Image (cartoon, helix red, strand yellow):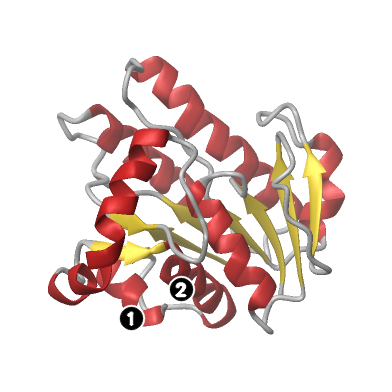
């Protein structure tokens, strides 16, 4: 597979990138980034891109890829609904629509989150916006689209969060994360398992379009 990856400089995207470059099913990875990942690999090519609401100059890249792993996102903390909608719904659907228009044979995998509300009527703002975003992607004419709804994600294999206090929590939890995986498989996963699950779903498909931690852990 030839993969387009969004969010490669973030914790989740970095974990997905590591799995992509080590998986024989992935021929190449094009990372669309604002700044370099700092990683080098024969499979990896980075494209520095400033405007994440416009993709006119990237349509040729989209046309040549088999799958998109969209791991780009922001926290809703400190944002009102309008701002969060722009950085979640508007930003994500701008990329997804450009890809669907250019290459409907692509498989689109979107990292959302557990608690996302597909009805778009939740009293929780982020849940409504994420649900609206998922629904918009699923309505596009992709060959296939899958929504990944992880819960707690433990970074592994050297992947780190750029948010210091998040990383401190991960460092504390790290030694017991294997235990958490065993006792709470419906709530906990790792960056590696998420990456492997996305690759497997893009390659082989899956029985449902919305995947929860148990699905992710099974596949990963």
Q: Is 12 located above or below residue 192 in the figure?
A: above
Q: Is 142 located above or below residue 94 in the figure?
A: below
Q: Secondary structure at mark 1?
A: helix
**Dividing the image into 4 quarters, which one contains the C terminus?**
bottom left
**Dividing the image into 4 quarters, which one contains the N terminus?**
bottom right
Q: Quadrant of residue 84?
A: top left
Does residue 185 show up?
yes
- Circles 1 and 2, Cβ within 8 Å, touching? The answer is yes
Q: Residue at x 73, y 48 (%)?
A: 38
Q: Secondary structure at mark 2?
A: helix
Q: Is 81 located above or below residue 128 in the figure?
A: above
Does residue 149 show up?
no
Mark pair 1, 2: CA separation: 8 Å
Would residue 104 appear left or right of 217 to someone viewing this image? right
Task: Point out residue 21 in the picture as x, y percentages from the top left corner.
Answer: 69, 71
Q: Residue at x 34, y 19 (%)?
A: 81
Q: Which one is nearer the viewer's eye here, 7 or 205? A: 7
Give the label on residue 178, or none: none
Task: Point out residue 42 in the picture as x, y percentages from the top left corner.
Answer: 84, 69
Task: Point out residue 216 in the picture as x, y percentages from the top left corner.
Answer: 36, 71
């Amino acid at each position: 597979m030839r993969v387009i990856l969004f969010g490669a400089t973030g914790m989740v995207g970095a974990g997905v990138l590591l799995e992509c470059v080590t998986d024989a099913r992935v021929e190449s990875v094009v990372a669309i980034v604002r700044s370099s990942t700092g990683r080098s690999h024969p499979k990896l090519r980075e494209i520095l891109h400033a405007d994440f609401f416009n993709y006119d100059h990237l349509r040729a890249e989209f046309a040549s890829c088999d799958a998109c792993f969209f791991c780009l996102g922001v926290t809703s903390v400190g944002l009102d609904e309008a701002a969060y909608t722009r950085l979640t719904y508007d930003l994500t659907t701008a990329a997804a629509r450009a890809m669907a228009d250019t290459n409907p044979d692509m498989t689109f995998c979107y990292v959302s989150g557990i608690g996302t509300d597909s009805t778009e009527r939740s009293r929780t703002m982020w849940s409504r916006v994420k649900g609206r975003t998922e629904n918009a992607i699923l309505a596009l004419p992709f060959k296939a689209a899958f929504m990944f709804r992880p819960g707690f994600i433990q970074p592994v294999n050297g992947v780190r969060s750029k948010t210091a206090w998040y990383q401190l929590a991960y460092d504390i939890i790290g030694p017991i994360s294997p235990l958490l995986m065993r006792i709470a498989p419906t709530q906990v996963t790792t960056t590696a398992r998420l990456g492997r699950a996305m690759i497997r779903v893009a390659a082989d498909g899956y029985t449902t379009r919305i995947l929860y931690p148990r699905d992710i852990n099974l596949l990963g």
